[in-house]
Image (tube, rainbow, N blue to C red):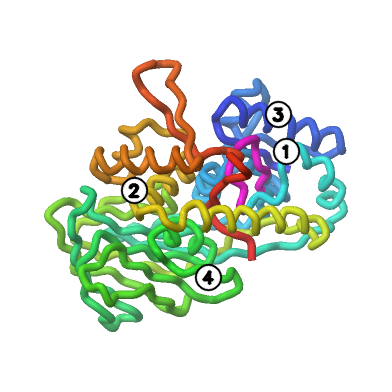
Amino acid sequence: MGIVSGPEATVVEDARTAIATFEAAGVEVALEQRLAATLGREGAQLEDLDADIIAVVGSDRCLLDTLIRLGDRETPVLPVSSKGQPDFLFDVTVTALDTVVGDLMDGRWTEDRRMRLVATIGGSESPPLLNDVAVFARRSATLMRYTLVLDGEPFWKDGSDGLIVSTPTGSTAYSMSVGGPVVLNSAPVFSIVTVNSVNPARRPLIVSDRMEVEIRDLISSVKIEAVLDGQLRKEVGDGPVTIRRSDSDAVFVKFSEERIAVLRGKLLKKAEVFDNAAHDLPPSAKLVLKVLEYKGQLTQRQIIEETMLPARTVRHALSLLISEGLVQKRVSLRDSRQGLYRVTPGPPGQRSPPGLGRRD
């Protein structure tokens, strides 16, 4: 069992608990070098980690980062939810890990394969991406003009704040926060969602995953960037950006229906609560909420940089999210004048918004 974790102190402690659980059950453990250095143990770089399964302890952000660094490798991944972290692809929590170790050792699990995207930007190909490719002007509320081309044929010309191309897994992440459709994981399609188009009739588009999606003729008064899975930013210039299905999938450990029945009920409840709590929020508040889910705890300045929204808009969005109980604020220990914002880990009233993707 390979073990990877986020850098936060509480997550590292949960990783230590996971290691102890596996070792107590007789599972051989190999640690990624960053985690190993923190724990004072031997480790290896992620690309050199020799493991049958890789357990990722932490949050959505840590999981997305790990998958990007794994590249084309299809080693099965077991997401293990840390305390207070989003857990939409995390069937297992650290506290419940001991209940599934026997299933892992006896092979009582199957592979849950998730399609991924690859983006080519400036002739350079990205790593496989689980969620989405988002193309935006660097400065918020700045128009970006482009041509959408499908399999070499121009499909539409548009002006908008941006464009998001997502997988079925990513359809319940960034895409959904700007009005995109929810797509079942089994559907062999991509969704293409334009953000605040100048054409009010423009609607989200569903295309076959066999198609090549190209965004060309990019024009804006500021630089244009592609944001990859919320983790990487690449300057686009005048394009083009070409997106296709990756040759390799992301592979997750999937336990029996009986094992995850309780969690499924929890996920349905979370989705219902999110619909009730966030349905009437403005798009700017939904975007801030999604950025906090991707990036974890951020200052107001960092949120402004990540969302590219005006400072006044971010302040208003945070005020709404805090009043709804979806976001918490605390004072930074390093600078008492500065606030730190994060997604509310549990409820006020069992409230916790969906994370990087839902299980179908």
Residue occupying image coordinates x 34% and y 18%: 337
Quote the CA–CA distance across marks 4 and 3: 36 Å
Q: Is residue 355 magenta?
A: no
The type of residue carrying mark 3 is Arg
Count neighbours of disc 4 (C-alpha within 10 A) and say few if under 14, some if 14 to 19, many if 20 or more.
many
Q: Which residue is mark 4?
A: 183
Residue 31 lies in what quarter of the image? top right
Closest to the observer, 230 or 332: 332
Q: Amino acid at mark 1?
A: Val
Measured Cα–Cα span from mark 1 to mark 2: 31 Å
Q: Quadrant of the C terminus?
A: bottom right
The Cα–Cα distance between marks 3 and 1, rounded to whole angstroms, is 10 Å
Neighbourhood count class around disc 3 (C-alpha, 10 Å): few under 14, some 14–19, many 20 upward: some
Which circle, 2 or 4, is nearer the viewer? 4
Q: Which residues are magenta?
A: 79-88
Task: Say which residue label 1 marks.
Answer: 94
Secondary structure state at the residue bearing disc 2 = strand
The reply to whether the C-beta atoms of the residues labelled 2 and 4 are less than 8 Å apart is no
- In the rendering, at what x and y percent does residue 87 appear? 62, 47
Which numbered disc flags the more N-terminal residue, 2 or 4?
A: 4
SS majority, magenta: loop
Residue 16 badge? 3
Which numbered disc flags the more N-terminal residue, 4 or 3? 3
* Extreme residue in the left direction: 221
- Residue sitting farthest toward the bottom: 153
